[in-house]
Image: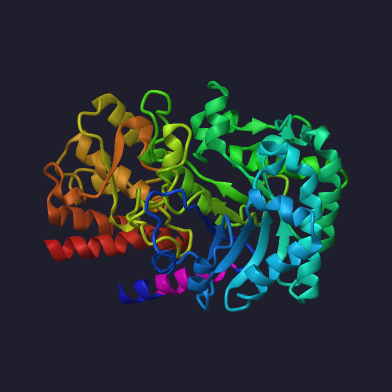
Amino acid sequence: MAKLHFFLLLLLAAAQATHGEDGAYIGVNIGTAMSSVPAATQITTLLRSQNIRHIRLYDADPGMLSALANTGIRVIISVPNEQLLAIGNSNATAAKWVARNVAAHYPSVNITAIAVGSEVLSTLPNAAPLIMPAMRYLQNALVAAALDKYIKISTPHSSSIILDSFPPSQAFFNRSLDPVLVPMLKFLQSTGAPLMLNVYPYYDYMRSNGVIPLDYALFRPLPPNKEAVDANTLLHYTNVFDAVVDAAYFAMAYLNVTNVPVMVTETGWPHKGDASAEPDANNDNADTYNSNLIRHVMNVTGTPKHPGVAVPTFIYELYDEDTRPGTASEKYWGLFDMNGIPAYALHLTGSGVLLANDTTNQTYCVAREGADEKMLQAALDWACGPGKVDCSVLTQGKPCYDPDTVEDHATYAFNAYYHGMGMGSGTCYFSGVAVITTTDPSKLNSLPCSNFIACSFAFLDSCRGNVSLLVQAMDLVSIVGRTAARC
């Protein structure tokens, strides 16, 4: 067992070292529309405790930048929309802005980019003519300070500027924006900066009136016949996120720009909303979306058009913002409340070391109390068949046979499948007859503690010879250890 544990640690360390700082990464946006904004030092303490290494600020607050000094955290700072007029009309004003907000802090603050405005083309179209002058003036200031090789300039766009976004191969930018977008894309191309895009599958799902399935929005696994297929390219899409990112790539290609990468500057899912108008804004869906998103990005899955190409992504957002106007859900996109308490637990096994509020190694998948016995049996049959759980230990005379009930046998099979699949979101569903719990199965129903330990080791035994499954089962090793200690 000691050799197994050491082997798993080596593999885990290797997996964490796979992702370079300039490749796949997940960042977090930090908004401040709160009735009580945490002190800058509190924010940086939370970031470091959660191993968050990339953030985006919506301004360039000097107190926040000072608190970020020498932390190594990579920072995107922003020119707020209300400052565009001054910077877009004056090279000197842009130079002063860079001197005050960039040069005064770099390199002790690891500033990597400047986001010029936010969704200006869609929310402030009258200010659109100011975008390119502001970006050029800021670039001139970076060049003068010899910082242009280290800090990129771009502007975040709403995905709504992309028209006819499905199929992605037919997507194009709103043609009325060409006078701004064409020179902007050439600018990004020449400076090596990304196209910054805000992607919100939640809103796409809400506005689709049932056309977009919830599972498709949440990255849940889809059977092949449910995948969306682009008839022009025959590319298969299993989630909204990839389809929108590829729509941006195709829209750029329509304008003969093919070498500008996409950075997703905002995406996420609200964990609470109006119960009647926004029923899908809840903890389970927020956990499912963000956990699957993180895994998708960190595994460098890429998109169907660009498989294996990293899509750096920033989750919206770090804190709930209780003073944001709009629908109820607008206040509840945070991973934490303003006191730094997790809004919900993420399930991030297989995603490297990120966000310490992950309680995956303390969760179990069990049969839902009161579930229909026929549905339980069907789910058990699937787990032991297509699900490839070794259910031989459930046969008569084997350690997991007793108690001989469908519910107890299903709990063993569901939990084995859940842990074998890395405890990923969507792997404890079984047509609604399974549920995730923090109470281990040895405390549920009549399953004896010693029997649970025997069954757990039987599951691990079945993994021998299969390195991939063995690595996926590593969290079960610690669960068994804690269970044994309690017994």
Q: How many marks?
A: 0
Task: Identify the image quadrant of residue 27.
Answer: bottom right
Q: Is residue 426 visible?
A: no
66 displayed left or right of 347: right
Q: Quadrant of the C terminus?
A: bottom left
Relative placement, left or right, of 166 versus 402 is: right
Q: Position of residue 437 (x, y in %)?
A: 26, 45
155 or 212, nearer to the observer:
155
Residue placed most toward the observer, 33 or 479: 33
Locate the N terminus and report the quarter of the image it occupies. bottom left
The reply to whether residue 62 is visible in this rendering is yes
Q: Could you tell me which residue is drawn at 65 percent across and 48 percent down?
A: 81
Where residue 453 appears, x then y in whole percent? Answer: 20, 58
**Magenta stretch: residue 11 in it?**
yes
Q: Is residue 69 above or below residue 116?
A: below
Magenta-highlighted residues: 7-19
Please name the residue shown 51% across and 71% down the image: 68
Residue 140 point in image, percent of width and height: 81, 66
263 left or right, relative to 39: right
Magenta stretch: includes residue 443: no
Front in this rendered view, residue 215 or 480 = 215
Point out the residue furthest to the top here: 209
**Residue 483 in the image: x percent, y percent?**
19, 60
Where on the picture, by quarter, is residue 12? bottom left
Residue under the image location 37 percent in, 37 percent down: 429
In the rendered view, would you say 176 is above or below 53? above
Of helix, strand and loop, which mostly describes the magenta segment? helix
